[in-house]
Image (spheres, coloured by chain):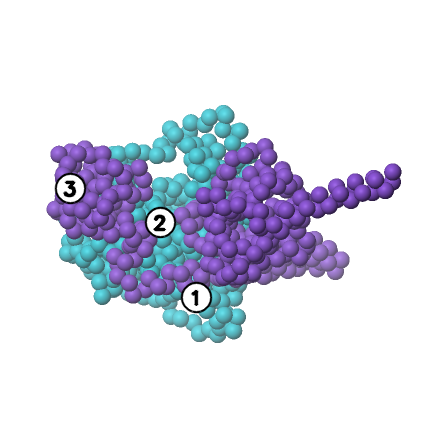
Amino acid sequence: MRLIKLINYSIFALFLFCAISAANDGIEKWQIQQNLLVSPPLYLEAADNDTIEIKFKSPLNQTVRILWVGTFDNNLIPQKQVEFEAKEKKAYVINLKHRNPLWDGTISRIILTPVLPIDSIKIKKGTLGDNLSSGIFEFFGPKGRAVVGSTINNIPASSFCGRSVNHYAYWIIFIAAIALTLLSLSRREREAGTKIVWTVIVLWILLETNAWYNQINILKSDWPLWGKTLDEKRAEVTGADFYNFLKFCDQKLPPGSKIQFETSAGYFHSKATYYLYPHRMVTKEADYCLVYREPAKAKGTIFAKYKEGEYILKCK
Amino acid sequence: MQMIYALIIPFLLGLSVFLIVYKKPPLYLALAAAYPIGIGILAFIMFLLGLAGIPLNLINISVAGWGVIVVFSVFIIIGRRGFESSPSFQFRPIDFLLLLLIGAKVAYVLLEAMIKPVFTWDAWSRYAAAAKYIFFDHSFRTPVFARTMEDYPPLVIFNQAWILFCEGYWNDIAIKIISPLLFLSLLVIFYYGLRRFQERTTSLLFTFLLSTLPFIVFHATTAYLDLPMTFYYTAGTIFLLLFLKDKNPQDLLVSAIFLGLGIWTKRAGIYLAGIDSIVLLGYLAIENREKLWDTLQYFIILALIGLPWVVYNKLVAVSHYYTVGDLAAVNPDSFSRLPDLLGAFADKMFHSANWHLAWALFLIALVFFFRNIKKEKAALLAIIVLNLLALIYTFMFTGSYQFLLDGTLFNRVMMYMVPITVFFVGLLAFKD
C-alpha cells in the first residue's frame, strides 16, 4: 500500500515537473501566431513566477515586447506589457513585477513580439541576483531616457527594482538625517543641518550624473543632424515621407492657395497648417484638397501627384 | 551675421534701459539682464508699430529699435552711467570646477536647442506658427494670428518673428535661440542675487544645482514659453528680495520690469506678479513702513508695462481662459479631487526626474534652518507658499483639473517657482 502511494506521488511529481518544465524551458512548445510568439497555456501564479529569462540565439537590435493575459481577463491590453531593448546575444533577466505592477494574479499566456530567434525562455521566482541584474537592466532601460512626446510635460525617473531611484535616495537621506541629528545632539553640536544638506547634494550629484548620461545619449542621437539641410532636419522631426509630401505640395500649389486637408490624423492636419502657410488651411471653399494615404473625400481632378495615395486635388 | 544682428538690437535696447535704471551694475549682471529686458522692449516696439498699422518688417523695426537705443544712449551719456569697476578676486579650484560644470550645461543646452527645428507640439502648432504668420503677413492683427494665439501673450512670438525678419526666410531653428540665452541669463542673475547674501562658492554651488534641473534644462532646448516665464518670474522675485534686503529702489524698479515683462510672456505672469506684489506690501507694512512709498514706483512701472497687454487682450482676444469668473467659481465637489492632487504632487515633486532632490532639500532646509527664516527669507518663503497654494487652487477648483489628470501642465506651472525654491535653500544653507 505504501509502495503504491509512493509510486502515485512519484508519478504526480513527475507530471508536475513536466508541467512546470513545459512552461520553463520548452521554447519548442511556443507557437507563432500572426507574428506573435505565444506560449502554451501556463496558469502561473504571478507572485511566485515574477521573473522571465530569455536567451536569444543571435545579436539583435530590437525592441522586444512581453505581453500577457490572465485567467480572469483573456484580452490583450497595451497596459499589460513590458518593453526592453535587446541588443546582444545573451540572457536577459527581467523581473516583470518590478517593471509592471499589472503582472499580477494568475497568468494564462505570455506573448512575445516580434518573433525572434530564441534559445530558451524560463519563467521563475527571481533570486536576489536575478532581481539585482534585472534592476540594473531596468535602470538603463527606456524609461526616463529617450526624449518622447511627453518629456515636455514630465521626465520620469530611472527605475531600479520597480521603484524610482529617488526612492532609494530618500531612504539614504532619512537614515543619514536620523544618524547625523543624534550624533550632533550627543556632541552638543549644531552642524547636523549642514551635514544633511551635503548628503543631499552628494546624492543630487549622483542623480545628475545619470541625467548627464541621458543628455549625452540624446546629443549623440541628434548629432547626425549637424550638416544636414533645414529640409532634411524638418523631415527628421516630422516624418520623412509626410514632410516630403508637404514640400511637394508647397512647390506645386500656386502662391496663397486656399487648401483643405481632410485627414483622420490631427497631427498631419496641424503639421500641414504649420508647414504650408502662407497657403491657407480652410474648412470650405478650398481651391485645392490634399490627399495623404486616405481615401479622398473631396471631389475634383488630380492637380499634382507625389506618389500613389499622396496627391493634390483641384477641388470642384 | 543675420543672427548676430537679430541679437544685437534687443541686447543694446536692454543694456541701455538697464544702465539707466541700475547705477553701476557689475558688467556680468548688465550683460545677463540686457537680452531679456531687450526682447521685452522689442516686443513692445513691434506691438506699437502693429497697432499703428505700420508693417512689421526688418527695416521698420530696425529704425524704431535704433531710434530708441539712441535716445536711451543720450540718457546714459548725460547720466554718466557705467559699470562697477571689477574688484580683484581669486577663484578657488572648486569655483573653477563649478563654473566649468555650469558652462558645460549651458553649452549642452545651446547645442541641443540649435541642432533641430521646433518639434514640440505647442511650439510648432501655436507659438512658432504664429511667428511664421507675422513673418509672412507683416502684422499680428490678422484673423489667423488671433485664432492661433487666442489670449496668449506675444513677447516670445514677436521676438521669434523678429529673428525671422533678420534671417530673411522662414527658419524654425534660428528662432530657438531665445530659450538658451534666457537659461544663461537665469543662471547669472541667480548667482548675482545669491552672492548678495552668501559667499562665492556657496553661490556658485547653488547656481550649479539650478543648472542641473532636468526639466528646466529640457525646456531651455525647446521653443515653449515656460522657460521664458520661469526666467522673468525668477529674476523679478530675486530683485524684489534684494530690495527687501538693502532697500535700494533700483532693485525694486528692475523687479517691476521683469515681473511686468512676465505678464507679456504667459498668462501666469499676472498672478505671479500679483503674488510678489502682495508679499512686498505685506512685508513693508510689517517691517518698513517708510519704504511703502517706494512701492508706488514699483506699481507704476508694473502697470505701465503690464496694463497695455492686459487691456488690449481683454478687448481683442477671440477667447479668454481663466477669467476672474472662471477662477472664482468654486465647485464644492472639487474637494473630492484632493487625493488626485496629493498623488500628483507626491509623484511629480519627489519621484520624477524633473527636479532631482530640490523639494527634499527644501523640506530639509525648512526643518533644520528654521531659526534663520527671518525678514527677507520669510518673505521668500511666503512667496513659495503662495505659489504652492495657487497651484493647488488652480488644479483643484478650476478646469485645469483635466490637465492634472492628463499630466500635461502641472510640472510646467511648477517650474516657475522651482528656481526661487532653490534660491531659498541657498539663502539658508550652511547657516545652522
**Amino acid type indicated by mark 2:** Thr
Left or right of A261, for residue B303: right
Say if labels 2 and 3 share a chain.
Answer: no
- Gap between marks 1 and 3 measured at Cα: 54 Å
Mark closer to the observer (1, 2) = 2
Subunit bearing disc 3: A
Q: Count the marks: how many?
A: 3
The N terminus of chain B: image quadrant: bottom left
Residue A19 appears anywhere in the view: yes
Residue at 23% x, 46% y: name it.
Answer: A308
Disc 3 is placed on an element classified as strand
**Amino acid type indicated by mark 3:** Ile
Residue at 26% x, 61% y: name it.
Answer: A229
Residue B419, horizontal then vertical, whole percent: 46, 52
In the depicted view, which residue is nearer to us: B203 or B172? B172
Vertical placement of residue A260 versus A181, above or below: above
Which chain: purple?
Answer: A
- Gap between marks 2 and 3 measured at Cα: 33 Å
Residue that carries the numbered disc 1 in the rendered image: B104
User: Going from the N terminus, do you reach mark 1 or mark 2 first?
Assistant: 1
Residue that carries the numbered disc 3 in the rendered image: A302
Label 1: how many Cα within 10 Å (few below 14, some 14–19, many 20+): few
Residue that carries the numbered disc 2 in the rendered image: B120
Task: Report which quarter residue A180 is drawn in.
Answer: bottom right
Task: Report which quarter residue B83 is drawn in.
Answer: bottom left
